[in-house]
Image (tube, grey):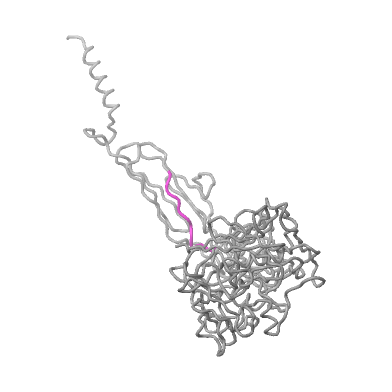
Amino acid sequence: MKPKRNACNKKLSGAGFISMLFVALPVFFSVQILGSMSPCYAGAYIFAGEDNGIDVVTHPSGYTGTGGVLTVGVCIDPSSENAADMEISIQNIVDTFNAQTITTDNLKTGGSNNIPDNFFDFESVALHEVGHCIGLAHVNASSESGLAVADMNYTKATDGADNTFNIAPGADNIIGSSDDIRGDDVNLHWFNDALNNPFQLTTPTDSTTYSRTIADLPAGHDFTINADRDVSTLLGVPNSEAIMQQGTGIDEAQRTLVADDVATLRYAMSGLDEVAGNADDYTLNLEYRGISSGAGCDITIKMLAINGLAFCLPNGQFINGSDHVRITSADISIDAGESGPNWFFNDVRNIAADTTPSVFSFVDQTDVVLNGVTTSTSITVLGVNSATAISVTNGDYSINSGPFTSTAGVVNNGNTVRVRHTSATTVSTATNTTLDIGGVTDVFTSTTISLEDTVPNAFSFTSLVDAAIGTLVVSNAIAVSGLTSSTVISVSGGEYRINTGSFVSVDGTINSNDTVVMRHITSSNFSTATRTSLTIGGVTGTYTSTTEAAPSGGGGGSSHPVLALVLLYLISVGFCRRKPA
C-alpha cells in the first residue's frame, strides 16, 4: 500500500515572496529561501500526518524490517547542469550523514564561510534535500502549512479537529519554543521526553526516550520545541539550527547536523519495533556512486531549470502493514535556470579522504573437498570515507552478495566482501586468495581434506525406454561427489565423456565435481535392452536403453515390416515363373 502524499511547498525571498509551483503528483519537499529565516529540522518524518497517520516513521530506500547495514546510493544525473561542480558537495553530504556528528554553531554567515556575496550555498541546500530523500520532513510548519511567513517556524503539527492551526508564541514571544499555545493542533515532532531539547541527544534513541505525545513533555512545557535559530539562542546554543528546518539565505552555509537531525535518523534506525538493540535495527550508509543514472542510484540529483529553488520528489510504501514507510524512489531537482539563483559550489572536502580501511580478517577453511569452489565468509569494510580500491589475487571477490569478479574495482564503507577460489586437486594442500582493499590485505586459505578417498558416492543413470532401434543415445549427466582425490573411471558397452571433453572408451581419471555422460547405440531389434556400465573408483552405474516394441501384427526376433514385404514379393515372383512339368 502506498501512503497518501501531502504537498510541501516552498517560497523564495527577495523583494517579496514568490510561491513555488508544483505538479499535483508525489510529495514535494524543498528548501525555502526566506532571507534571514531558517531551514527546518529533522524531528518529523515525511508522509506523517492526518492522511497516512500521525505516528508514521519513514525509512530510506531498501529497508524492509530486517536489520543490518542499509546502503543507499546517491548519484548525480549525467544530464545535470554543473554536474562536475556538484561532486565535492555531494561527497561531503554523504560523509555528513554517515558520520552523524552532532554540532552546534552550525550557521555560518559572512566572513565565517567561503561563500561569495549574493550566492546561495549549493551544499547546504542539497544537504537539506537529501535529508528529505532519506525520510526526514520539515519539522517547522513551513510553507506547506499555508501559514503566513512570520508563523512558519511553529513546530510541525496537524491543524487538529477544527481544521485550523492554533498558534500563539507564549510568554517568551519566541515561535517554536516550549510555551507555544497550539490549541487542538496535533504534534508531529518527536522529542526527548525528559528534556524537550532538540540540541541535546538522548540515548538510546528510541521509543523508550523519545515521544510524539504532548502528555510526555516535561513539567511546565506546553508544546514541542523545534531547533530554530531563534530558539537556539534561548537554549544557550546560538547560531545553531537543524538542517531540516525549511529556509536558507544568501551567503549562508549550514553544512553540519545538530542533535535533532541525528536523533530523528537514529529513531528510525531503531527499526519497526522502535526499540534500539534488536534484530530490526539498521545502520545507515549513504554511498556516492558518481555521475550516473544506472542501477544503484537510490537518490538522483539534477540541476535544471525549474519553477523554484529545490525539491525532493519521494515515493513511499508501507512496510508489512505497520505505521512505518520506506521510500521507494527519490529524485532531487535544483534550479539552474537563467533567472534562478547564483550558486556557490563548495570545492573543499569536509573531511580528508581516508581510503585505508580497518584491518580485516577472513576465517580460513580446512577439510574442504578437492577441486571444489570454496567461498569465504563475509568481511565488512570499515574505516574509510571515500571510494577505495579493491583487487584480488588468485580468486574472485563479491561486493554485497553481487556477482563475483576478478577485475579490480572500488568499495565503500559498510560494504561486505567475500572471496572464492577452486580448492586444490590433491589432499592436504592449501590454496590462498589475497584480497587488497586500500593497501590493507588478508589471505583466505582453504586446505583440502587430509584423507585420500577414491570411492565416490553412489550414482545412477536414468533408463531410456521406447528408443528407436539402431540409434545413438546419450544418458543424463551425473556429478561425481565424495572424492578427495582423483580416481579411475572405465566403461563397458559404450563410451563416456567427462565435462565438455570428447567421448572415449578407454580408462581415465576423474575428480569430485566433474560431470559424466555415457552413450551407446540401441539394439537393432525391437523390445531389446542395451546396457552400458560406468565404473568410478569401484562404484558402478548402468545406463539402459530399451527399444520400442514391434508394430502390431508383427513378430519378434528379426521381423521387420519392410523385410517381410520384400520376401513376400520374391516368393510370389518365383512362384509365377515356375515352368509346368
The dominant secondary structure in magenta is loop
Residue 293 visible, this angle: yes
Judge whether residue 522 is colored magenta. Answer: no
Q: Nearer the viewer, residue 181 or 101?
A: 181
Q: Which of 252 and 126 is in front in this view?
A: 252
The N terminus - image quarter: bottom left
Is residue 57 shown above or below 198?
Answer: above
- The percent position of residue 441, horizontal first and vertical second, equals 71, 68
Is residue 451 shown above or below 174?
Answer: above
| Residue at the left extreme, as displayed | 581
The C terminus - image quarter: top left
* Residue in view at x 38 percent, y 36 percent: 470
Q: Nearer the viewer, residue 515 or 534?
A: 515
| The image quarter in which residue 91 lies | bottom right
**558 with respect to 257 (left or right):** left
| Residue at the top extreme, as displayed | 580
**575 with respect to 80 (left or right):** left
| The image quarter in which residue 391 lies | bottom right
- The percent position of residue 390, horizontal first and vertical second, equals 69, 62
- The percent position of residue 372, horizontal first and vertical second, equals 56, 61
Number of on-image labels: 0
Q: What stretch is highlighted in magenta?
A: 474-484
- The percent position of residue 38, horizontal first and vertical second, equals 67, 71
| Residue at the bottom extreme, as displayed | 219
